Structures are given as C-alpha cells and as structure tokens.
Image (cartoon, rainbow, N blue to C red):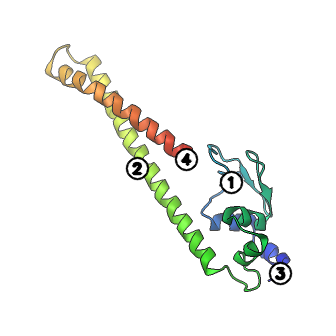
C-alpha cells in the first residue's frame, strides 16, 4: 500500500485505538507524548491529531512515529506500507501496551474502591461518635478507631491521586 492508500483506509481514531486509547465524546485523549497530562489534551480529528498541552501534532504516521520513537519508514511499515498489514513486532508492542494499560486501570479501580470503602467507614465512625453516649462502649471503640481510619483514608487518597497523576 502507498502512503495515500493507508491514509485513505486508516483513520486517526483507528490508530489511537490500536494503542489502547479511547477518545472521549469530544475526541480527546490523555497525551502519551508528555508527562503529567491530568486532563485529556490531545484532540483526535478524522485524519490528524493535536495536543494543546505539548504542541504535538500530525497525521497517522506522525502519531506512530512519536509513539514508537521511530522514523517514517518504520511507521509506514507498522501501518501496513509495502506488506499491506502491520508488522508482527508492532502488533506485539501494541498488545503489550494495551495489557499494561488494562493492568493500570484495574489497579486504579481497586485503589479507588478501597478508598471509598474506608472513607465511608470513617464517615460512619464520626457519625457514631456524635450520636453515641460519651464514654459508652460504642463511643470508646469508635473514638479509638478514628485516628487510624483518618490516617488510612488520607494515605489512600494520596495513592489514588498519585495513580491518576501517572496518566
């Protein structure tokens, strides 16, 4: 296939999805070309992309070049130039990247779930302390537990923020 044939048959969205990204409704993804992209700043157009954070832009070949850190010839081959299909190495790299992304997403979801569990337990603890008779068995038990719960929630909150910041 020629460059023009590849461009005619492969959309920008197809390429970013091969790399495990799912554009939101507005067509944005988190930019893979710079660190610390907390909000999706890379806009996907039908035949190009532009990052409003780092300024990266181009067509499908540029995206592959930047993602793979390779030259145009390699990007051309990855997208099916000459042979008409993606190289096995490219397919394998993309599959590995998708698996890493899924594992990261599972880790984030697990940490968020743990955070919300302990945050709710903290809320119940504080509510119980307010409603229980001072120095009762229930009040004493919850008062003793309160500092540990606060510390746990604060720690989990920081872990969740760090995980979100990574991507």
3 or 2: tag closer to the N-terminus: 3
Q: Which residue of the protein is positioned furthest toward the left in this rendering? A: 137
In this rendering, is residue 129 above or below 27?
above
Residue at the disc numbered 1: 33
Indicate the quadrant where residue 21 lies. Answer: bottom right
Residue 153: image tag: none
State which mark lies toward you, 2 or 1.
1
2 or 1: tag closer to the N-terminus: 1
In this rendering, is residue 114 above or below 107?
above
* Crowd tier of the residue under label 1, counting other residues whose Cα lies within 10 Å: few below 14, some 14–19, many 20 or above: some
Q: Position of residue 115 (x, y in %)?
A: 39, 39
In the image, 139: left or right of 94?
left
3 or 4: tag closer to the N-terminus: 3
Q: Position of residue 33 (x, y in %)?
A: 68, 54
Secondary structure found at label 1: loop
* Crowd tier of the residue under label 3, counting other residues whose Cα lies within 10 Å: few below 14, some 14–19, many 20 or above: few
State which mark lies toward you, 3 or 2.
3
Residue at the disc numbered 4: 166
Q: Residue at x 40, y 31 (%)?
A: 154
Q: Residue at x 20, y 20 (%)?
A: 139
Residue at the disc numbered 2: 110
4 or 2: tag closer to the N-terminus: 2
Residue at the disc numbered 3: 2
Secondary structure found at label 3: loop
1 or 3: tag closer to the N-terminus: 3
Indicate the quadrant where residue 69 lies. Answer: bottom right
Residues under labels 1 and 3: Cα distance?
Answer: 27 Å
Q: Residue at x 40, y 38 (%)?
A: 156
Q: Looking at the figure, which quarter contains the N terminus?
A: bottom right
Residues under labels 4 and 2: Cα distance?
Answer: 16 Å
Residues under labels 3 and 2: Cα distance?
Answer: 45 Å
């Amino acid at each position: 296939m020629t460059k023009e044939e590849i461009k005619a048959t492969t959309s920008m969205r197809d390429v970013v999805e091969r790399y495990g990204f799912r554009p939101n409704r507005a067509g944005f993804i988190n930019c893979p070309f710079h660190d610390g992209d907390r909000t999706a700043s890379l806009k996907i157009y039908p035949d190009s992309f532009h990052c409003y954070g780092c300024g990266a832009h181009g067509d499908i070949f540029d995206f592959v070049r930047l993602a793979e850190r390779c030259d145009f010839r390699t990007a051309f081959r990855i997208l099916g130039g000459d042979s008409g299909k993606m190289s096995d190495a490219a397919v394998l790299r993309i599959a590995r990247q998708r698996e890493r992304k899924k594992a990261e997403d599972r880790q984030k979801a697990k940490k968020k779930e743990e955070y919300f569990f302990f945050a709710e337990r903290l809320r119940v603890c504080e509510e119980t302390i307010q409603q229980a008779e001072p120095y009762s068995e229930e009040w004493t038990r919850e008062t003793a537990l309160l500092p540990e719960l606060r510390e746990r929630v604060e720690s989990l909150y920081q872990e969740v923020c760090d995980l979100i910041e990574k991507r």
